Image (cartoon, grey):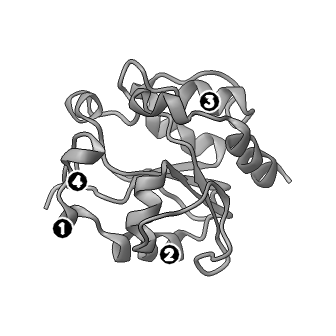
Amino acid sequence: MRHILPDVLAPGLGVVFCGTAAGAVSARKGAYYAGPGNRFWHTLHQIGLTSRCFEPAEFARVLECGIGLTDVAKTVSGSDRELPRHAFDSAGLERKIRQFCPRALAFNGKRSASEFFHRKTVQYGRQDVGIGETVVFVLPSTSGAARKFWDATFWFEVARFVQS
């Protein structure tokens, strides 16, 4: 099946950010985190992982900053509550991470992490389990729909880890 958004991956990245699936606006525009209320691009700049605030259409340029992008559900789009359970490909994500070996995998939201780990609940922050040599973090979602859970503290934690 065709991926809604292409993976942005390369060997040796500092961090790969993994969302749940492309949102409706992102799927329509063909760009990661393109929804008007999503604070992903602003946050990357705020925490010092990019030298400026990228536009969603420039998403492939994150490789220049040592950053990768993917989703745990690549063939569907929409809000978390709309996604069918069969669309999540945890094994495929794990294969990609083992292949490209980034220093860190950071889930952008609890839903993507809980689907990957096959657990109902996960906690924010650095996880006790990694994927090979890759350290795993769970971060509050940058989606506008998750604004009430927003806390940049965990995003700064990832930035410190990647920049150390």
Looking at the image, is mark 2 or mark 4 earlier in the sequence? 4
Looking at the image, is mark 3 or mark 1 earlier in the sequence? 3
Image height of 128 relative to 4, above or below: below
Residue at which label 4 appears = 3
How far is the residue under mark 1 from the one under mark 4? 15 Å
Residue at which label 2 appears = 99
Q: Position of residue 118 (x, y in %)?
A: 39, 74
Looking at the image, is mark 1 or mark 4 earlier in the sequence? 4
Q: Position of residue 41 (x, y in %)?
A: 54, 28
- Quadrant holding the N terminus: bottom left
How far is the residue under mark 3 from the one under mark 1? 31 Å
Of badges 1 and 4, nearer the viewer stands: 1
Amino acid type assigned to the residue bearing label 3 in the image: Thr
Q: Position of residue 67 (x, y in %)?
A: 59, 47
Q: Quadrant of residue 150?
A: top right
Residue visible at 28% across and 64% down in the picture: 88
| Residue 11 located left or right of residue 31 | right
Amino acid type assigned to the residue bearing label 1 in the image: His
Residue at which label 1 appears = 86
User: Is label 2 in a helix, a strand or a loop?
Assistant: helix
Residue visible at 64% across and 71% down in the picture: 134
User: How busy is the neighbourhood of tag 3: few (under 14 within 10 Å), some, or many (20 plus)?
Assistant: some
- Quadrant holding the C terminus: bottom right
Q: Which of the labelled discs sits on residue 43, or is there none?
A: 3
Residue visible at 65% across and 41% down in the picture: 65
Q: Nearer the viewer, residue 117 or 10?
A: 117
Looking at the image, is mark 4 or mark 3 earlier in the sequence? 4
How far is the residue under mark 3 from the one under mark 2? 27 Å
Q: Position of residue 58 (x, y in %)?
A: 45, 29
